[in-house]
Amino acid sequence: MKKVLSLFVLSGAVLGALFFLTQLSVPSASQGVRPVTLTPGDVIREGSVVSIEYTLTDEKGNLIESNVGKEPMTYIHGAGQIVPGLEKELTGMKAGEQKKVTVKPDEGYGSVNPDLLQELPKDKIPAEALKPGAVLMMNTPQGPIPIRIKEIRDKTVVVDLNNPLAGKTLTFDVKVLDIKSAS
């Protein structure tokens, strides 16, 4: 975290989608995802390509995000593309089934890590983001990561590199829309 490549401000709506979707990635053959053959009425299992509709809320019932009435989220089951607690609970479900799933931090985005609070030079932060709670994206050699402004000091800014959903118990209201085999 020694070099800040670039920072840009994100809106709240874009940020919510980004955090959930940061779990998505395209698996490679070396990750052991085996294609499966599905028959009508089949269930979600490792290697299934699953399309879901979901509403995500926090422990107080506050809406974090929802794709209901929008494009479904599609992932490969067993490839680690969604939080482990949700993936575990979706195993065995059929298309058309709906379920409310509570995911504790240890099976979601983890606990808050105090080591992920860092100080950056104040002059490296865009002026419009110099307020506690502002969220920016920082480009790193590993790709962009979200950061939140925690505190403004005289010459530095304390930023939080924890995922904003870290330490939170999450509730997913999920409906399985489609299940296909991975190709």
Image (spheres, rainbow, N blue to C red):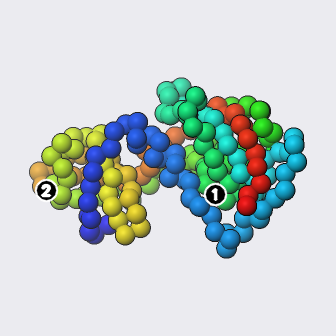
Residue found at the far top of this picture:
61
Whether residue 102 appears in this view of the structure is no
Whether residue 39 appears in this view of the structure is yes
Check the image and report above or below for 81 versus 62. below
Check the image and report above or below for 34 versus 20. below
Using the image as rendered, state which of residue 99 and residue 24 is in the foreground. 24
Q: What residue type is labelled 1?
A: Gly
Residue 40 numbered tag: none
Using the rendered view, name the quadrant where residue 114 is placed.
bottom left
Residue at figure coordinates x 44%, y 54% from the top left: 113
Query: Which residue in the structure is indicated by mark 2?
Result: 123
Q: At numbered mark 2, what does the secondary structure look like: helix, strand or loop?
A: helix
With 62 as the anchor, is 52 left or right in this view? right
Q: Position of residue 12 (x, y in %)?
A: 37, 37
Which of the image's four quarters has the C terminus? Answer: bottom right
Which of the image's four quarters has the N terminus? Answer: bottom left
With 112 as the anchor, is 85 left or right in this view? right
Q: Position of residue 133 (x, y in %)?
A: 30, 40
Query: Which residue in the structure is indicated by mark 1?
Result: 80
Task: Estimate how packed mark 2 is, as few (under 14), some (14 to 19) or many (20 or more) residues with alpha carbons within 10 Å.
Answer: few
Residue at figure coordinates x 40%, y 36% from the top left: 13
Q: Position of residue 156 (x, y in %)?
A: 17, 55
Closest to the camera, between mark 1 and mark 2, is 1
Check the image and report above or below for 173 versus 75. above
